[in-house]
Image (cartoon, helix red, strand yellow):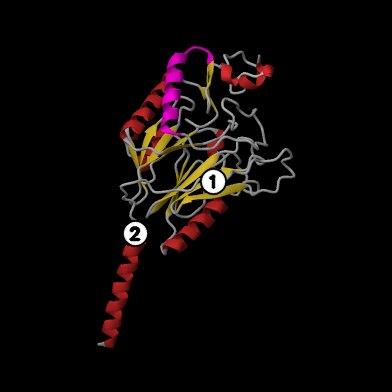
Amino acid sequence: MLIKSILIINIFLFFCNSVQAQISFERDDPAPGNLRFSWIHGSQSAKANQDQRIQVHRYNEHTYILRQNPAVHWEAPFMYLVIGNERAALLDTGATEEPEYFPLKQVIDRLLERWAYAQGTDIPELIVLPLGSQQSQVAAINQFTNRPNTLIIPPDEASRRKVLGSNWLQGGKLDLGGRVLDALPTPGLDTEAMSLYDPWSDLLFTGNTFYPGRLVIRDFKAYRNSLKNLRELVGSSPVSMIFGGRIEMKNRPGLDYRLRSNYRPDERRLELYPEHLTSAYFAVKLINGTKDIRILDDFIIMNGVGRGARDYGYPVFIPERFRSRSSR
C-alpha cells in the first residue's frame, strides 16, 4: 500500500512539473523588455580590442539580442534568439564563419542550457533561420551543421516551407510551441529577405530589410511592395518596436558611419518604430524608381547606386538641417 501511494505521488509530481514547464505566451499587452544598455562600439585597433566577440543582451526571459563585435567584423550584425516551449529560433548567424574568431554556436549552446535550467525543462530544438542571404546573415550557419536537435533553414523559399508552411509567401507561421510568429517575405534589398512579427512581445524582426543605416535598393518595385506590406502589418498588429540587422547611423540625425568602420562610439540606437516605416515608404514613393539618395534622420535610402556611394561623394540633395560648412 505504501509503495502504491509513493508511486501515485511521484506520478502526480511528474505531471505537475510537466504543467509548470509550459510557459504561457498569451498576453493582453506586450511582454516587457529591457533596452537600458549600450552596445560595444569596437576600437580603432581591432587587434587591441578586449571586448567579447559576441555581446549578449537579455531583452526578456525568452528573447535575447546578440551582436557581433565591430572589431571582429565591421558590419557588426545583430542576431536574435527567440524561445518558445518546444523550439528556439536563431534569426541570422553573423558575418564571420570561423568559430575561433566568432564562437556563435558555443554562445547559443550556453544560452539555451541556462534557459532550460532556469525553466526546469529540456533544451529546446534549435531552428537556425537567417532572415536573408547577405553575408552578415549567413556566414556562421555551418557552425551548426553537426549540432544535435537542430534544424538549419537556408535562406530560400523551398527550405523555409519546412517551418513556415507551404503557402508562407502569402503569410506563414513559425510555431515555437505556444509562441507563434508571423512570417512574410520582404525582398527588395535582398531577394531572399523575410521578416517576422512576434505577437507575444509585439516586436518586428526585419533583418537587413529595414534598419538604421544605408538601405540600398536592388529591386525597386519589390522593396516598395515590402514596405507597403510591413506598413499593413503594423496597421493591423500592435507592433511596439522594429529590430533590424545592423546599425550604420550615428546618433546625430542624417549622419552615417563610413563603410568598414570598426570603431563606432556614437551609434544611433538599434530600435525603430512604426512611424519610421511610414517615412521610409513615402520616401521610396518619391524616388519612384529613379537614381537617387534620400537622407532621413534615422536611415538613408539609396536607389540605383552602390552601397559605398555616400563615402565617395556621390551628389545628393542634403536637407538644410543636415548641412555643415564641409558639406556645402
Q: Is mark 1 on a helix, strand or loop?
A: strand
Residue 169 at least partly seen:
no
Query: Callout 2: 10 Å neighbours few (<14), some, many (20+)?
Result: some
Residue 147 at least partly seen:
yes
Using the image as rendered, state which of residue 69 and residue 10 is in the foreground: 69
Say if 242 sits above or below 284 in the image.
Answer: below
Which residue in the protein does label 2 denote? 22
Q: Give the range drawn in magenta.
A: 273-292
Residue 311: % across, % down: 65, 22
Residue 114: % across, % down: 50, 60
Q: What residue type is labelled 1?
A: Leu
Q: In which quarter of the image is the C terminus?
A: top right
Residue 66, labelled with which disc? 1
**Sequence order check, earlier mark of 1 and 2:** 2
Residue 109, labelled with which disc? none
Q: What element carries label 2?
A: loop
Q: Which amino acid does label 2 sit on?
A: Gln
Chief secondary structure of the magenta span?
A: helix
Q: Distance between the residues labelled 1 and 2?
A: 25 Å
| Horizontal side of residue 102 vs 280, given as left or right | right
Q: In which quarter of the image is the N terminus?
A: bottom left
